[in-house]
Amino acid sequence: MNKNLLTAVGALALSASLAAPAMADKTKFDFWFGLTGDLAQRVGEVCQHFNDSQADFEVVCTSQGNYDQTLQNTIAAFRAGNQPTVVQVYDVGTATMMLSGAYYPANKLMAENGYTVKWDDYFPGIARYYAASNGDMYSFPFNSSTALLYWNKADFAKIGKTEAPKTWEEAAEDMKLLKDAGSACPMGINISANESWQLLEQFSAIHNEPVATKDNGFGGLDTELVFNKTKFVKYVTDLKSWYDQGLVKIKAKETGKTFVEAFAAGECDMMMTSVGDHGTVAKIAVPGLDWDVAELPVYAGTERKNSLVGGASLWVLAGKSPAEYKGAAAFLNFIAQPEQALFWSTVTGYIPVTKSGFDYMKAQGFYDKPPYTGREVAIASLTASEPTPITRGVRIGNFTQIRAEVSNGLQEIFANNKPVQEAIDGVVERGNALIKRFADTYPGKTLP
C-alpha cells in the first residue's frame, strides 16, 4: 500500500475516532447482513466507524449467516413485527423485495430526510440492476463485484504469452500449450450452484445473449428461460470437450481444493471468479506466484458488452419509527462517501459503486501497486458498454433454485449422464416451472 493510501485509510479511522461524541441517548436501529467470517468483521468495522462519528444514532449490526438465511430471517421477522430497519439483500433477492411492498424506497427515504443523492454517480451497470423500471433506486448498492479471468503470468510466459486470452478460441489454444508444457490444470472451474452465475449469467451478458424472455425478466413475472437456444449451449459443449481433453479441471472442496485455492497454490493456470476473490488470492498465494486478472474471454467476432454486477444492496424496511429512518438515512449517506469506498475496497475485494468513489481511490493511488493492482479491470468490465435490456441483469423469481438446477444440469453433462442439449433443455423446463410457481405467488402483481 502506498503512502497516500495509508494516509487516507488511517485518516478515516482517526477522523471517526476524533468525532466520537460524548455519551448521550442515541436512537438505535438494527442492520442485518448476510456475510460471515472476515467479511462480517469488516462490516462490523464500517458500523463502528459510523457509530463513532454519530451523536444521535447507533446502528446495531448483526450477521444472519449467508444471503439466503438473511432474506428468510427477514421475511420471518417482518411477519412477526420484529424486522430490522436496514437489511442486506443479495442480487437475486431483488425481485422478491420489490414485490413484497415491505420497504421504504431508498430514493424517497433520502429525500424525505434531507439528503441529496446524485443517483447518476452510480455506475450504470450497477444502478440499473437495482433500479425500478422508471429508474428510481429502491435500495442502496453496497458490496458489488463482477467476474474476472485470473491467470498465472509465469506459466503463460513458458508458452511465450505475455497477455491473457481475449477470446475463447485463443484460450483453447493456450490451454493446449500449457498442458503440453506440463500443466496439470490449465483452467480450474466449479459447476456448483454457487458458481453457476459466472458460467451462465456473466457469459450470456458479455455476449449479449438472453437468459430469459422479456428482457431477462425485467419486463414481467411471466418470463421464460431461453438459454437452451443461445450461444451458452456452444460454451458448455466446449467446456465439456476441454474437460475431456484434460484442459479444464473441476476444482471444489469435494475434490480437495477450491478453484481459488488451486489457483493460489499455482496448481491451476486460469480460473474465472469474482473480483471479490482478488484479496483472497493475494493473501493465500504461494510465495512468488506471478498472477494477474483480465476481462472474461468472449468468442471471436463478439462485440463485448458489460458484465453483470453481483453482490448485494441495502434495503430499508417498512414499519419503523421516523427516528429510526433518520438514523438509516444517516447510515446510508455515511457508507456512500468516497472515503468509505476506499476503506471498504481496501479491506475486502469489493469494488466502488460510484464514479466519485472510483475517482477518489485512483487519486489516492489505490490501484498503483500490489495487492490492489488489477481490481480496476472489474470497473472496465462493468462499463464495457452501456447496459442493454439484456446486460442490465437477470430479474426472475426463484432464481436461487434455478441456479441450483443449472448446477444439476452441468453435473449431468460432466458426469456423462446426458448430452449437452438434452441436459440444458431439462434445466430450462424445470426452471420455467419454478418461475411459474413464483409468479403464481404474486397474482396480479407486476415488478415496479
Image (spheres, rainbow, N blue to C red):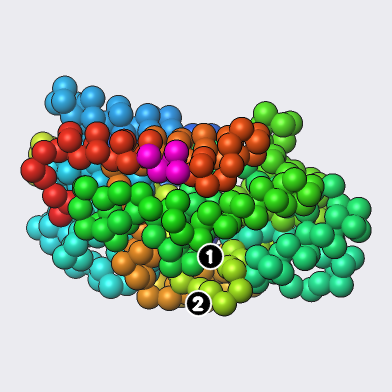
231 with respect to 226 (left or right):
right
Question: Residue 33's x, y, as percent?
Answer: 37, 38
Left or right, 432 with respect to 15, comes to left
Which residues fall within the magenta stretch? 425-429
The label on residue 61 is none
Separation (CA) of disc 2 from disc 1? 18 Å
Residue under circle 1? 378
Q: Main secondary structure of the magenta part?
A: helix
Mark 1 surroundings: few (<14), some (14-19) or many (≥20) residues within 10 A:
many
Say which residue appears at 87% left-offset and 67% top-offset.
Answer: 159
Residue 298 visible, this orientation: yes
Label of residue 303 in the image: 2
Mark 1 is on which residue type?
Answer: Ala
Front one among 200 and 293: 200
Dot 2: few (<14), some (14–19), or many (≥20) neighbours within 10 Å?
few
Q: Position of residue 88 (x, y in %)?
A: 33, 42
- Quarter of the N terminus within the rendering: bottom right
Helix, strand or loop under label 2? loop
Q: Is residue 419 above or below residue 121?
A: above
Furthest-top residue in view?
A: 80
At horizontal 81% and vertical 55% (from top left) the residue drawn is 289
Q: Quadrant of residue 148?
A: bottom right
